Image (tube, grey):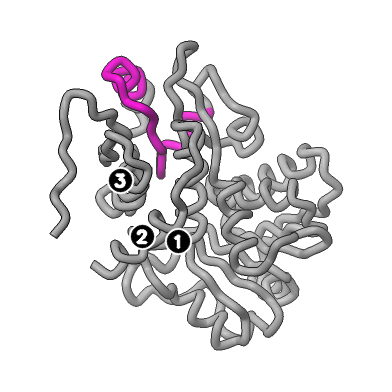
Amino acid sequence: MTSPRKIGPQTVPYAVLGHPVAHSLSPAMHNAAFEAMGLDAVYLAFDVTADRLMATLTSLRELGFGGVNLTLPLKETAREEMQLLHESARRAGAVNCVAFTPEGVRGYNTDGDGFLRALAELGMDSLRGRSVAVLGSGGAARGVAIACAHAGAAQIAIVARNAKRAERLTADLHATGSSVETRAVLEAAAQEQEVRAADLVVQCTPVGLRPGEPPLFQADAFREGQWVVDTIYVVPETPLMKAARQGGARVANGLGMLLHQGALSLEIWTGAEAPVEAMRTALEEAMTL
């Protein structure tokens, strides 16, 4: 039996902040990484509401934390309120990784590049010329859509119910300077057509988290030759993934995106290469508990 890791005065703390945050698998992933790297560090989880975010970040910096990740509903709040932003956070319109620097609290976004790394690992190593249907129009949808635009996607359809947010996102995609063709798709019949036509479908809503919840689309909305990725990672196979698989599509959940955005965060904080396989093993084990 391995002896437990010792935490002492020199241990550097890291954390994920969110509300709620009890479901997070990030502590398992990052603590496994610290152990594999031989670092005297520990990764924790704290429930923090949006109105307390900036005060909490200031306190964590003063207490000597090495860095933090942010999850819902804090990503967009951080983007609006933080003064020091890396280009990745400006582009994505959200912050999921915070580094504590001599200049202050600096926000990054590793979700987009983490998503692209996960896609490459699945076998879709290029989005150039491909069509993408993004389900949803919130923060996760924004990060994925902008990453796809910068990766060279030819068409991006924002399939959503909130017209205002969907149209704002399409306008932001136009402003990226890429040649991507974008549109907001709000009508149910047109949405199903967009999903079936897309080379890649990315589910960015919380639909599927609650037991017994029906999928956004049934099996006949999917086809062979397309990839369907659900950004939900706490469910091994969501209802949408099951429907897509029955329709002939190749499917994946959000575990790969979680893994690679976490690895990129770790590299920002430490400047060292992340032990991706140790992190993957920890995630897979945590999923079975």
Question: Can you tell which of label 2 and label 1 is closer to the viewer?
Answer: 2
Say what amino acid the circle numbered 2 marks.
Leu
**Mark 2–mark 1 distance (CA, rounded to whole Å):** 8 Å
Sort mark 1 into few (<14), some (14-19) or many (20+) by Cα contacts within 10 Å. many
What's drawn in magenta, residue-wise?
A: 55-79
Q: Are marks 2 and 1 in contact (CB under 8 Å)?
A: yes
Q: Is residue 208 above or below residue 154?
A: below
Badge 2 or badge 1: first in the primary sequence: 1
Say what amino acid the circle numbered 1 marks: Leu
Q: Position of residue 277 (x, y in %)?
A: 44, 58
Location of residue 233 in the rendering, given as x and y in whole percent from the top left corner: 42, 62
User: Which residue is found at the position 30% from the left and 65% from the top?
Assistant: 285
- Asked whether 60 falls inside the magenta stretch, the response is yes
Identify the residue shown where x is 74% and y is 42%.
171
Residue positioned 32% across, 34% down in the render: 14
Q: Secondary structure at mark 2?
A: helix
- Left or right, residue 81 beside residue 211: right
